[in-house]
Image (cartoon, rainbow, N blue to C red):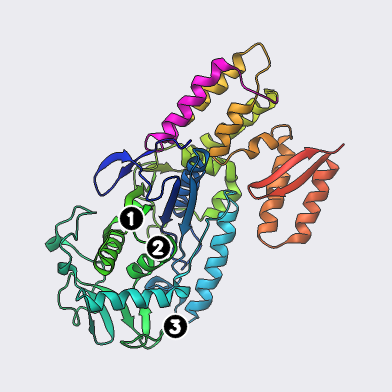
């Protein structure tokens, strides 16, 4: 039976019940990265948040379709490529993105559309906006008439007259109104990719890409649109406006935004400031389990401090879970611990409160450790499964040095150095353990 889930909705500014369009089924679209460089730990937060939300919903009995797009056509990619090929850069960074997020061991989203492969749907949506008078062609560009949408600004709670689309002077001479934003950009000298459209050769604007991809895979009026809070304006405001005006209906029923990473002194983390680490380096230094536990340690809507201390605390938490798992026996957990298991899932059902859920889990572990009798592991396995940390049971009996070798082997395989990976496997086996690759990472078992 499906459990009721309540989530904070950015549009209404309240925590309200999720009421799926189709009973028992939930569609989620979360904005993915713009692939002009390797993704950083901040980019990993929405990937982890919405992957774990999917796990919880599936545990509650829902069938879930998770879509996370890849923006591989964008001004930032042209700028980063310089005199090189923007297409080749985007392809390389997309491969790195898949490899880096694979190492999180949470599985892949159900769909991962590329903007470059969605041009036909993008053109069709722009045509609908032109036909309805919500867009206009100017010098080969196409712009959205912001003031034609009476609901514009409702999502971000901004006054229309005080808005800035962040497009600088690009196209300013062609716009009817400085507030208007680009749906299509005419091909310019030095740009090495372009597509044909009825109004001329060019490429899509950023915002229309997501509207078209989300609608194409989930339909109009799907259940949850997610992404980082930094995307609320202009990106998500513009997505909502485009669909509302092209289709006469709202894009999503629920808007869910995760908070940003901040340094331990409160400064925002960003590539431009240079104070944030690439995800693959954080995984190298701390391991996927510590990264996931760290990201789950703060409520998804709140900022989360990033630095050596929070990650070290997460690593210590991982070891604490592993130690607890070693002491448990296989089978049902005692009924006196059942309320803590229920508290764990009740916290997730109330605005996906992972810190409160973790508090219940830690109390469960404390009580299990105090028990003079053998404690069954079923409750803890169930809780860790929703958090994507079920592999800690498979690693519970392995010495730390063997776990370190297996982690290094997984990283080496992800980098394509299979010869070195085989050498590490041999070292693991020499220590008396077998390693097996799984969708969530790896498992270790003693050799008989």
Total marks placed:
3
Which comes sooner in the sequence, label 1 or label 2? 2
Bin the neighbour count of mark 1 within 10 Å (Cα to Cα): few under 14, some 14-19, many 20 and up.
many
Label 1: element kind: strand
In percent of width and height, residue 182 lies at 27, 74
The answer to whether mark 3 and mark 2 are in CB contact below 8 A is no
Q: Quadrant of residue 14?
A: top left
| Badge nearest the viewer, 1 or 3 | 1
Is residue 171 within the magenta segment? Answer: no
Q: State the residue lying farthest toward the left.
A: 161
Which comes sooner in the sequence, label 3 or label 2? 3
Which comes sooner in the sequence, label 1 or label 3? 3
Bin the neighbour count of mark 3 within 10 Å (Cα to Cα): few under 14, some 14-19, many 20 and up.
some
Q: Quadrant of residue 135?
A: bottom left
Name the disc covering residue 370, or none: none
Quickly name the residue at label 1: 252
Question: On screen, 399 above or below 245?
Answer: above
Bin the neighbour count of mark 2 within 10 Å (Cα to Cα): few under 14, some 14-19, many 20 and up.
many
In percent of width and height, residue 425 lies at 79, 50
Quickly name the residue at label 3: 193
Task: State the residue at coordinates (19%, 52%).
Answer: 157
Quickly name the residue at label 2: 214
Quarter of the rendering occupied by the C terminus = top right
The answer to whether mark 1 and mark 2 are in CB contact below 8 A is yes
Say which of 203 and 192 sits in front.
203
The answer to whether mark 1 and mark 3 are in CB contact below 8 A is no
Segment colored magenta = 330-357
Is residue 345 within the magenta segment? Answer: yes
Q: State the residue lying farthest toward the right.
A: 448
Q: Is residue 275 visible?
A: no
Question: Which SS does the magenta portion mostly show?
Answer: helix
């Amino acid at each position: 039976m499906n459990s009721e889930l309540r989530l904070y909705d950015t549009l209404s500014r309240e925590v309200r019940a999720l009421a799926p369009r189709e009973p028992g089924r939930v569609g989620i679209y979360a904005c993915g990265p713009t692939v002009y460089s390797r993704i950083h730990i901040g980019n990993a937060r929405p990937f982890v948040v919405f992957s774990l939300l999917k796990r919880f919903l599936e545990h509650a009995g829902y069938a879930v379709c998770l879509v996370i797009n890849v923006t591989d056509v964008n001004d930032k990619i042209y700028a980063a490529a310089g005199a090189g090929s923007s297409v080749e850069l985007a392809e390389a960074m997309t491969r790195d993105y898949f490899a880096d997020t694979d190492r999180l061991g949470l599985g892949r989203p159900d769909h991962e559309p590329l903007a470059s492969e969605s041009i036909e749907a993008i053109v069709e949506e722009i045509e609908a906006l032109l036909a309805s008078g919500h867009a206009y062609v100017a010098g080969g560009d196409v712009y959205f008439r912001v003031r034609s949408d009476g609901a514009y600004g409702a999502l971000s709670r901004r006054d229309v007259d005080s808005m800035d689309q962040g497009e600088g002077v690009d196209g300013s001479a062609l716009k009817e109104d400085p507030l208007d934003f680009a749906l299509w950009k005419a091909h310019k000298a030095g740009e090495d990719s372009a597509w044909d459209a009825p109004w001329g050769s060019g490429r899509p604007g950023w915002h229309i890409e997501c509207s078209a991809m989300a609608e194409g895979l989930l339909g109009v009026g799907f259940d949850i649109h997610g992404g980082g809070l930094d995307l609320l304006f202009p990106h998500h405001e513009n997505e909502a406006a485009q669909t509302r005006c092209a289709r006469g209906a709202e894009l999503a029923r629920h808007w869910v935004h995760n908070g940003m990473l901040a340094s331990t002194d409160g400064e925002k983390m960003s590539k431009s400031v240079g104070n944030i680490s690439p995800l693959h380096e954080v995984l190298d230094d701390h391991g996927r389990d510590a990264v996931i536990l760290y990201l789950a340690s703060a409520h998804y809507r709140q900022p989360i401090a990033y630095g050596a201390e929070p990650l070290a605390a997460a690593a210590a938490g991982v070891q604490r879970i592993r130690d607890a798992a070693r002491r448990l026996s296989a089978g049902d957990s005692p009924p006196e611990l059942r309320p803590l298991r229920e508290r764990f899932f009740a916290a997730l059902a109330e605005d996906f409160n992972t810190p409160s859920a973790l508090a219940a889990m830690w109390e469960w572990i404390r009580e299990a450790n105090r028990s003079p009798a053998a404690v069954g592991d079923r409750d803890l396995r169930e809780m860790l499964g929703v958090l994507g940390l079920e592999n800690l049971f498979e690693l519970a009996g392995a010495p730390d040095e063997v776990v370190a070798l297996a982690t290094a082997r997984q990283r080496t395989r992800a980098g394509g150095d299979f010869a070195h990976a085989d050498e590490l496997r041999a070292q693991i086996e020499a220590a008396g353990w077998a390693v097996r690759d799984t969708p969530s990472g790896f498992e270790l078992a003693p050799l008989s």
